[in-house]
């Protein structure tokens, strides 16, 4: 029986872990398909695997990978997630924002700031396993063209000192989105840890479908070649933030 490969990578810093995930996906991913909201055929051809990415020191420099094509908009994306700078786009071409789902989750005309709930829960009981936020709205998201990829955030304080964050993603563009997603999620981790009064610890990122679209297969090969060339020259593709 053919199955989705279950892959894991681990690195010290954020760009190292993302780089490893792309190279491992390239090596061991399988050709597959997914529903598309951009392709007229309704189908995207992809290279796919399930991927767990472990970042042991997410705030240790360097934090930027020069292979991320969205670097020019990285700070804007963080503001979009943490500050809600694009919440006004919901209903005008966008079905959701992560800020809206995390900070203003709405059900039955009631809004819940899930991030604030996480902070308060951790302050009350540092070792709780209940400090989490979810994004999926089953009464809505089965019907929309582009439902959220991020599904859940889970936080726990280790030894009363370190805030560990886990995130779960149902579907993920490994090449175009994953690095920016992780950068923004670790920014959220730092926000929560600062509010609770602890240090930001390990970040664990888990995707059910971690994939590269066929239109980016050539880009993935160029990425792998650039990484190899950088290693041979002794210069990493990582830079301080």
Image (tube, helix red, strand yellow):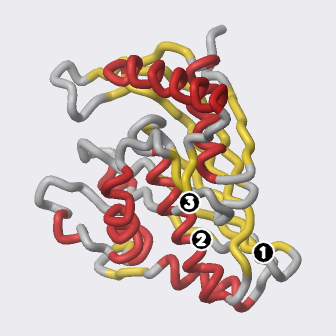
Quadrant location of the N terminus in the rendered image: top right
Q: How many marks?
A: 3
Of 198 and 209, nearer the camera is 198
Outermost residue toward the left in this view = 92
Q: Is residue 57 above or below residue 212?
A: below
Q: Which mark is residue 189?
A: 2
Q: Is residue 46 above or below residue 115?
A: above
**Which residue corresponds to the image point at 59% horizontal and 71% vertical from the top-left?**
189
Q: Position of residue 157 (x, y in %)?
A: 77, 75
**Which residue corresponds to the image point at 66% horizontal and 26% vertical from the top-left?**
232
Are there few (<14), some (14-19), or many (20+) residues within 10 Å of tag 3? few
Q: Which residue is mark 3?
A: 240
Of 113 and 47, nearer the camera is 47
Secondary element type, mark 2: helix
Closest to the camera, between mark 3 and mark 2, is: 3
Q: Which residue is mark 1?
A: 162
Q: Is residue 238 left or right of residue 127?
A: left
Say which quarter of the image contains residue 78.
bottom left
N-term-proximal mark, 3 vs 2: 2
Distance (Cα) linking label 1 and label 2: 11 Å
Say which quarter of the image contains residue 45.
top left
Of 3 and 75, nearer the camera is 75
N-term-proximal mark, 1 vs 2: 1
């Amino acid at each position: 029986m053919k199955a989705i490969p279950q892959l894991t990578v681990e690195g010290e810093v954020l760009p190292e872990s993302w780089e490893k995930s792309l190279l491992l996906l390239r090596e061991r991913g399988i050709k597959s398909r997914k529903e598309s909201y951009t392709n007229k055929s309704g189908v995207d051809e992809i290279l796919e695997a399930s991927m767990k990415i472990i970042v042991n020191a997410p705030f240790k420099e360097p934090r930027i990978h020069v292979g991320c094509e969205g670097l020019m908009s990285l700070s804007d994306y963080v503001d979009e997630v943490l500050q809600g700078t694009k919440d006004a786009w919901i209903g005008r071409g966008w079905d959701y924002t992560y800020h809206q789902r995390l900070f203003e989750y709405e059900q039955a005309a009631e809004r819940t700031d899930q991030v604030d709930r996480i902070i308060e829960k951790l302050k009350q009981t540092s070792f709780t396993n209940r400090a989490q936020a979810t994004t999926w709205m089953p009464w809505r998201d089965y019907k929309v063209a582009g439902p959220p990829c991020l599904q859940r955030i889970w936080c726990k304080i280790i030894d009363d000192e370190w805030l560990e964050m886990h995130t779960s993603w149902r579907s993920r563009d490994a090449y175009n989105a994953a690095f920016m997603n992780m950068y923004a999620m670790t920014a959220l981790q730092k926000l929560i840890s600062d509010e609770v009064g602890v240090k930001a610890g390990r970040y664990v990122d888990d995707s059910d479908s971690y994939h590269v679209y066929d239109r980016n297969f050539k880009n993935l090969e160029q990425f792998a070649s650039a990484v190899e060339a950088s290693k041979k020259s002794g210069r990493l593709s990582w830079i301080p933030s």
